[in-house]
Image (tube, helix red, strand yellow):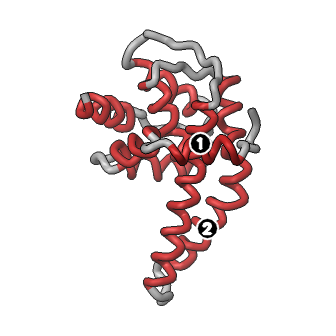
Amino acid sequence: MGSNIPAQALNLVRGIDANSFWEFSISVYKRPGVADYCLNLQDKHGALVNLLLFCCWLGLQQRRLDRALLKQVERVISGYNGRVTQIIRAERRQLLGTDSKQQVKRALLAQELNAEREEQDRLFAWFADGLDLPVDYSGSELVAINVQCYLNELDGILPSPEVLVDAALNCCAARL
């Protein structure tokens, strides 16, 4: 499946009481050190935070990513990310440190969060679309394996994903 998620699938996902990936992401992202880690990778290495979080979430769903599957996942949101999310983020960042009204900055931040949510809905729909992703019972190390699979695609010397992986695993344990 490419980046053209059928509207029907998106509506189905949105109709679910809770997009567990979105809720998971919020829980993990607010844990100490995670936002800084993710934003550092985003700003310095071009990482997509939603893909980092999706790698964690897939691991907790007992699904393993390989390079080919990761490329499929990237295509699900890359077009939308480039056309929408990145543009809104750039506009918001241009206003940082300026005398622009706080109301405008807040509005852009809200639009950026909506764009991030749209990306997550697309990823969740891709996962829920009946893909035959094999279940892997390797345990909690799947989170680290999936994150490392994505990090291997980025350039530069990357910080250890330990803070993100630990937060994901602790978030999951806290819900049990």
The quarter of the picture where the N terminus appears is top right
> Do tag 1 and tag 2 residues touch (Cβ < 8 Å)?
no
Residue 88's tag is 2
Residue 127 horizontal/vertical position (percent) = 59, 31
Residue 175 horizontal/vertical position (percent) = 26, 33
Residue 161 horizontal/vertical position (percent) = 42, 34
SS for callout 1: helix
* Amino acid, disc 1: Leu
Q: Residue 121 or 13: which is nearer the viewer?
A: 13
Q: Residue furthest top?
A: 137
Does label 1 or label 2 sit earlier along the sequence?
Answer: 1
Mark pair 1, 2: CA separation: 26 Å
User: Which of the 4 image quadrants contains residue 141?
Assistant: top left
SS for callout 2: helix
Residue 26's tag is none
Q: Count the marks.
A: 2
Residue 12's tag is 1
* Amino acid, disc 2: Ile
Q: Residue at x 43, y 38 (%)?
A: 20
At label 2, counting other C-alpha atoms closer than 10 Å, the crowd grade (few under 14, some 14-19, many 20 or more) is many
Residue 7 vertical placement versus 62 (above, below): below
Query: Does residue 176 appear to the left or right of 148 in the view shown?
Result: left
Q: Residue at x 54, y 19 (%)?
A: 64
